[in-house]
Image (cartoon, rainbow, N blue to C red):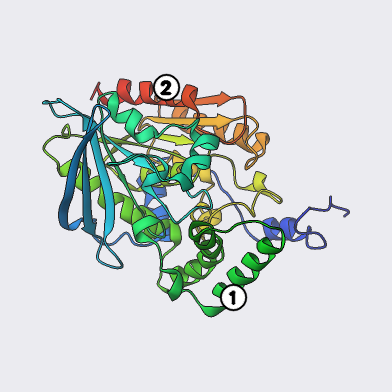
Amino acid sequence: MNLPMKSHLGIYSDWIEASTQLADLYPVASPGEETRQKIRSILGFNNSTPVAQDVQIESTWERDGLVGEEISWSVGYGPRTQAWFLKPRGSDAALPGVMALHGHDGFKFFGKEKIADGKQPGPEAIEKLRAELYEGAAFANELAKLGFAVLVHDVFLWGSRRFPFETMPRTIRQQVEDWERRRQQDALNTTETDRYNAAARWHEHLVAKYCNLLGTTLAGVVSFEDRIAVQYLRSRSDVKPGLCGCIGLSGGGCRAALLQATCDEIGAAVIVGMMTTHPDLLDCHVEPHTWMFFPPGLAAIADWPDLAASRAPSPLLVQYNRDDQLFPIQGMQSAHARIAFHYEQTGQPSRYLGRFYDGPHKFDKEMQKEAFGWLAEILNSK
């Protein structure tokens, strides 16, 4: 049989059909505990209670109508996690809690700073990223101003949780040196941030190998650390008792989907720019994505939309960009239909909202406004 030649697989394009003949891939997995247990099993890092250890409040500040705290804790391995807690100045009552989740962005030198401002405005290095993805906004701060208690933290591989450059293998450091030399030949400047982000792109493949050897996945480790942060947020007296929300774009949307699937304490999840069926990514939409988005073993039990909907009818908002360069429109539309089907099967279809917007990969102010309003409606009703 003559099959269309794929852009990235080339002469191995028939590998896709052979794989589907040898295994039942991406079966429709209905929401419920059985599916969630299978997901937890393949992700790994799910056999211990997530607890923030040795929590310390490093400093506090007031700025732009908000009160902020710089917080750190240990997850039990690696450097301490640095986080910011934000709430409106003058708020006396406990507020609904929301986890603001930074993205991947091919940018690991910073984590929380990409979506939040602390004592000072964000570093110059993230201005372009914010302009392209968030219409210039520090969206975690804007969310807090609307009456939420917002926690934004660095997760495994980013910011305070990144691997030091000098610990990376010599082969990776040599690749960075070669890359930097080529940039110099083109009269392009390279900053420390640029250098680290380039190294981290190659280093993630090595970390994924370590995850496999240690019986887990990158998605599992990241989700474990996010559940630790949820536990801390819910423990605060100035946070409203009950379930909290989570929201993120791209890699942050990936993290939101994983929390929705693995964390019973999430009562409202917003996934922005990180939803498609996996088969529709084949083949030229695979390369740009993180290992977090491809947990080994998932294809045998479910598709990505099934993972996101596995706690249905828990409230879920998914925001799609029609011209998102990271996902084919067919994949986004198919994912939307699949999630809607799962929520219909629970008898509560209105608990899922899928919204499509014009434009490329982004979480602009229009999308932010709708997402923040949806979170307020859901969390203030609990």
Q: What residue appears at the point 48 percent right and 38 percent down from the top-left corner?
A: 130
- Tell me which amino acid carries mark 2: Lys
Q: Residue furthest front?
A: 187
Residue closer to the observer: 311 or 345: 311
In what quadrant of the picture does the N terminus appear? bottom right
Around disc 2, counting alpha carbons within 10 Å, would you say few (fewer than 14), some (14 to 19), or many (20 or more)? few
Kindly indicate the quadrant of the structure image that contains residue 63: top left
Q: What residue appears at the point 83 percent right and 53 percent down from the top-left corner?
A: 5
Q: Secondary structure at mark 2?
A: helix
Q: CA distance from mark 2 to mark 1?
A: 44 Å
Q: Residue furthest right?
A: 2
The image shows residue 246 at horizontal and vertical percentages of 35, 37
User: What residue did someone put label 1 on?
Assistant: 174
Around disc 1, counting alpha carbons within 10 Å, would you say few (fewer than 14), some (14 to 19), or many (20 or more)? few
Asked if 91 appears above or below 303 in the picture, the reply is above
Q: Is residue 274 visible?
A: no
The image shows residue 328 at horizontal and vertical percentages of 67, 38
Q: Is residue 311 visible?
A: yes
> For residue 369, which numbered disc appears in the image?
2
In what quadrant of the picture does the C terminus appear? top left
Total residue callouts: 2
- Tell me which amino acid carries mark 1: Gln
The image shows residue 4 at horizontal and vertical percentages of 84, 50
Residue closer to the observer: 364 or 66: 66
Kindly indicate the quadrant of the structure image that contains residue 151: top left
Q: Is residue 80 left or right of residue 288?
A: left
